[in-house]
């Protein structure tokens, strides 16, 4: 099978979140299933230079300027880079300008990505490569299924929702500018509160819709999680699948990670050395209690507005916490204040550092993820892999991947983490951190939790096989 992946980001070229990890991991994982995947991505500033030698396979005009599609490779990933300088070669990030605001022409920018996907689907590449199916990701790729349907192109499509909170809303006045048929506005495909909703349209037009965990697929059909599109998801319920994300278990491997002192389930002594190193790096005073970490965007979605209020009790009970992240300025400020008040027990570094994140997982006893919603989450998977016991809320992929330390699970010896119960609020997080303190004090039980997590398999092989089977089902 030949699959065209349409995505706005892809590791190692550009990353703002988990979408990039998925887009970067799927091609190699699918190759083992006999699937050839090419990845179409915008040529943001500097991206072409990361591809080495490239070949131009298509030339045209898209939304007011010249555009080309250039083929290259990064590692094992076959890249098709949409080089449209008037749309993508600019300062800032993929979606935001230097002031932190959306690029004003984001609707045109990602509509161009989807138009390019349709040109490829029509057989427009000069090397003759043509996909059997298009796999589009999030709102940035969601117009690809729409354009395919509008133009009667007989190529099926899959749309994966990585986070329904981002929907690609655009003014109705852009209908003609985006080459969207007015008939699709009149029948409700595109219309959402008198605006264009590109994600909604993609959900309706794609042959199948997937999410990044089974639980998230169910949650999206509920008003609380569906962000206004729960009715649309319900209308496609028979065509919605939840396929759990995986992690790159070669990059995230404590036995061979160059950023840390190596260790494994069979040779665990390096874990304690990493813990001592991390305690020193963050200026913490070792209390003998659990060393917990947060490696995250500091946002309400991640539940990290709850953290400052529970830190004093956690520290008083002997816990330590090291925090790495950036996000909401108010949350950043409150966490800085907490770290100042609880110096030696709590420390924070604002920003993101990939190597430091590896050191943090290697040194941590636990990783705290109190998300209000979490489509899949990779952080808890890194924690399991590195023996940092996840403390998580019961939502989305967190609930799919962490076995809570209930009396039954502890008795059966299968628990892998601590789960917040009931509402995601300060009381639930405080209670979960108290449970962490209690479990950590029982060395045999905590060792069992850690080993269970490290032995779990969350690589990409199983998920890739599920995607391949879904492609086959659609193409039959």
Image (cartoon, rainbow, N blue to C red):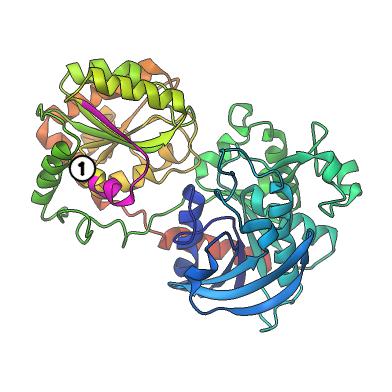
Compared to residue 197, the image places residue 118 above or below, namely below
Q: Is residue 276 left or right of residue 298?
A: left
How busy is the neighbourhood of tag 1: few (under 14 within 10 Å), some, or many (20 plus)?
A: many
Per the rendered image, the range of residues in magenta is 346-359
Q: Nearer the viewer, residue 351 or 145?
A: 351
What residue would you read off at disc 1? 450
In the rendering, at what x and y percent does residue 236 appear?
A: 70, 44
Q: Is residue 1 visible in the rendered structure shown here?
A: no
Q: Nearer the viewer, residue 297 or 25?
A: 297
In the rendering, at what x and y percent does residue 396 appear?
A: 48, 37
Q: Is residue 353 magenta?
A: yes
Q: Quadrant of residue 179?
A: bottom right
In the picture, the quarter occupied by the C terminus is bottom right
- Label 1 residue SS: helix
Q: Is residue 382 left or right of residue 5?
A: left
Q: Is residue 202 visible in the rendered structure shown here?
A: yes
Which residue appears at 71% of the width and 68% of the height?
67
Which residue appears at 77% of the width and 54% of the height?
146
In the rendering, at what x and y percent does residue 423 appear?
A: 45, 20
In the picture, the quarter occupied by the N terminus is bottom right
Q: Is residue 196 left or right of residue 357?
A: right
């Amino acid at each position: 099978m030949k699959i065209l992946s349409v995505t706005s980001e892809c590791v190692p070229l550009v990353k703002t979140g988990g979408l990039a990890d998925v887009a970067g991991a799927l091609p190699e994982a699918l190759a083992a299933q006999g699937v050839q995947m090419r990845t179409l991505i915008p040529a943001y500033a500097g991206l072409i230079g990361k591809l080495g030698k490239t070949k131009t396979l298509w030339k045209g005009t898209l939304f007011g300027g010249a555009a080309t599609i250039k083929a290259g490779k990064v590692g094992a990933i076959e890249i098709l880079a949409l080089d449209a300088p008037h749309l993508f070669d600019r300062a800032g990030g993929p979606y935001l300008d230097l002031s932190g605001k959306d690029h004003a022409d984001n609707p045109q920018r990602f509509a161009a990505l989807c138009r390019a996907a349709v040109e490829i689907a029509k057989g427009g590449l000069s090397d003759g490569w043509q996909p059997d199916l298009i796999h589009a990701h999030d709102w940035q790729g969601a117009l690809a299924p729409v354009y395919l349907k509008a133009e009667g192109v007989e190529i099926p499509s899959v749309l994966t929702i990585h986070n329904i909170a981002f929907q690609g809303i655009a003014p109705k006045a852009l209908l003609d500018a985006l080459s969207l048929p007015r008939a699709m506005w009149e029948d409700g495909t595109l219309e959402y509160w008198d605006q264009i909703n590109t994600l909604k349209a993609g959900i309706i037009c794609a042959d199948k819709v997937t999410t990044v965990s089974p639980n998230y697929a169910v949650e999206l059909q509920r008003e609380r999680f569906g962000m206004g599109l729960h009715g649309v998801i319900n209308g496609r319920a028979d065509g919605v699948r939840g396929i759990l994300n995986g992690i790159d278990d070669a990059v995230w491997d404590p036995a061979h990670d160059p950023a840390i002192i190596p260790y494994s389930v069979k040779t665990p002594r390096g874990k304690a050395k990493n813990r001592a190193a991390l305690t020193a790096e963050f200026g913490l005073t070792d209390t003998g209690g659990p060393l917990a970490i947060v490696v995250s965007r500091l946002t309400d979605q991640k539940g990290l507005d709850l953290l400052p209020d529970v830190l004093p009790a956690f520290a008083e009970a002997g816990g330590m916490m090291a925090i790495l992240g950036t996000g909401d300025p108010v949350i950043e400020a409150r966490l800085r204040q907490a770290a100042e008040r609880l110096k030696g027990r709590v420390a924070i570094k604002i920003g993101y550092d990939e190597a430091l994140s590896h050191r943090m997982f290697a040194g941590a006893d636990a990783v705290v993820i109190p998300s209000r919603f979490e489509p899949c989450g990779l952080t808890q998977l890194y924690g399991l892999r590195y023996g940092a016991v996840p403390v998580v809320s019961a939502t989305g992929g967190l609930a799919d991947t962490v076995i809570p330390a209930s009396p039954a699970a502890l008795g059966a010896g299968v628990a892998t983490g601590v789960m917040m119960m009931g509402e995601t609020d300060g009381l639930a997080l405080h209670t979960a951190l108290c449970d962490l303190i209690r479990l950590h004090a029982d060395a045999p039980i905590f060792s069992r939790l850690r080993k269970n997590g490290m032995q779990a398999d969350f690589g990409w092989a199983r998920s890739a096989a599920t995607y391949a089977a879904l492609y086959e089902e659609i193409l039959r």
